[in-house]
């Protein structure tokens, strides 16, 4: 039997973690679908996002099987240049797959080490870090890194994984000469379904859910401010890990200023298993994000029959035309308010049609999606470029 090509995956968080959101689900779905073709070896932290304690069900320092991958869980601060050199020498992969652009320990260091000695081919997935909205955060530090990378030619020979056409453009803005080395392969998803029938939609009221990390990029503060100006009864449930405590404090202050007709509640973190239940309890998914390279929660909401009101900074576009939501420019506050108000006005009869449109849209998207073949082409092309 021909030996499977080894793909070394570097990612800060992986299973059984769930708090970091989309990248974990993307990788888990990818490895499940292609794990019989490629020998995936994952290096990740031994704890979840924002957690200080290690996972309870993992061993220390040894490769272990999780699904169709071998996973090495490492402690924070233990994956410097020497550790990555030892890992590369031990595994001798045909490809290094980096699931970040800016992560020092799980992208920049392994990228540098991969270019030394054996010069292993490298595939970089920016995961939305090059979007215009993301680049506005910590701008000076990021500009310094871009300058350094340009001077030393750090990304001159890498291959790029873009998850959307918008991300192709984002990569080209920063690396104009990368055109031939960019592959487009959308994230792999599965259809979720609500665990119970939703409560009947009452005309004149709206149940909104926000399900994402609480961080400036996700733009929750703007969402709270806009919902607080709606003139009808609203229930707004906020789910997700608190990534930025200072930002969350501002959100809490905004919540305190909301009128009596708007009931906002922070519900805590949501495990992957509870996502269908949480989404199924709402009428609308609301995320005025500054930028997403895919947006797993958006797709999950649609597959649960939930229309989505989001910014135009994601790959999910022309949602109004499809009858499954609205994608609105970030600065168009009246547009967001109008979209939410339209759903609030619907009764059960009208809204049941919207729910079915959303489920049908999600099923059709999966049927039409050729991402599995795209990943085959992308991995094989990156490996050939490195030969």
Image (tube, rainbow, N blue to C red):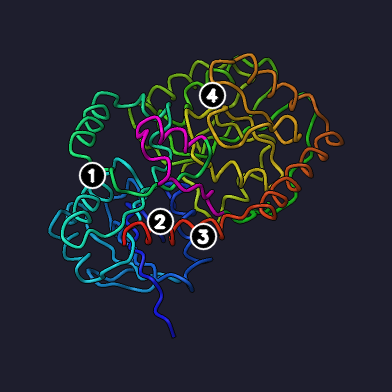
Q: Earlier in the sequence, mark 4 or mark 1?
A: 1
SS under mark 2:
loop
Q: Main secondary structure of the magenta part?
A: helix
Residue appearing at x 61%, y 47% in the figure: 300
Number of callouts: 4
Q: Nearer the viewer, residue 284 or 329?
A: 329
Q: Identify the mark at residue 223; answer none if there is no mark.
A: 4
The question of residue 175 being in magenta is answered with yes
Q: Earlier in the sequence, mark 2 or mark 1?
A: 2
Q: Identify the mark at residue 104; answer none if there is no mark.
A: 1
Q: Identify the mark at residue 17; answer none if there is no mark.
A: 2
Question: How far is the residue under mark 3 from the one under mark 2?
Answer: 14 Å
Tell whether 224 sits left or right of 7: right
In the figure, residue 262 lies in which quadrant? top right
Find the magenta span and give its range.
Answer: 166-188
Q: Mark 3 touching mark 2, by CB under 8 A?
A: no
Q: Identify the mark at residue 29; answer none if there is no mark.
A: 3
């Amino acid at each position: 039997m021909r030996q499977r090509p080894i793909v070394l995956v570097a990612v800060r968080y992986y299973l059984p973690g769930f708090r970091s959101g989309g990248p974990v689900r993307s990788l888990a779905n990818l490895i499940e679908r292609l794990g019989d073709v490629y020998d995936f070896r994952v290096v990740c932290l031994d704890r979840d996002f924002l957690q200080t304690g290690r996972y309870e069900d993992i061993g220390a320092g040894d490769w272990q099987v999780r699904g169709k991958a071998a996973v090495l869980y490492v402690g924070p601060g233990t994956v410097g240049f020497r550790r990555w050199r030892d890992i590369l020498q031990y595994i001798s992969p045909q490809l290094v797959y980096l699931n970040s652009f800016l992560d020092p320990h799980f992208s920049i260091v392994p990228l540098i080490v991969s270019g030394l000695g054996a010069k292993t081919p490298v595939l970089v997935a920016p995961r939305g870090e090059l979007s215009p909205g993301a680049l506005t955060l910590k701008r000076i530090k990021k500009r310094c890194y871009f300058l350094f990378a340009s001077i030393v030619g750090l990304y001159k020979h890498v291959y790029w994984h873009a998850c959307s056409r918008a991300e192709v453009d984002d990569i080209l803005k920063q690396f104009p000469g990368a055109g031939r080395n960019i592959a487009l392969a959308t994230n792999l998803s599965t259809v979720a379904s609500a665990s119970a029938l939703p409560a009947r939609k009452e005309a004149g009221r709206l149940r909104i859910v926000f399900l994402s990390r609480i961080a400036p990029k996700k733009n929750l503060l703007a969402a709270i401010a806009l919902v607080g100006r709606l003139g009808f009864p609203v229930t707004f449930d906020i789910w997700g890990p608190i990534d930025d405590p200072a930002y969350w404090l501002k959100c809490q202050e905004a919540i305190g200023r909301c009128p009596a007709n708007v009931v906002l509640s922070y519900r805590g973190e949501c495990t992957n298993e509870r996502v269908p239940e949480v989404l199924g309890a709402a009428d609308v998914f609301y995320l005025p994000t500054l930028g997403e390279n895919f947006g797993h929660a958006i797709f999950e909401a649609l597959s649960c029959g939930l229309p989505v009101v989001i910014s135009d900074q994601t790959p999910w576009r022309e949602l109004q035309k499809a009858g499954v939501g609205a994608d609105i420019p970030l600065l168009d506050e009246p547009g967001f308010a109008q979209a939410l108000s339209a759903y609030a006005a619907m009764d059960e009869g009208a809204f049941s049609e919207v729910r079915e449109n959303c489920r049908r849209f999600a099923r059709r998207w999966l049927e039409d999606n050729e991402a599995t073949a795209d990943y085959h082409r992308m991995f094989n092309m990156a490996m050939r470029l490195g030969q």
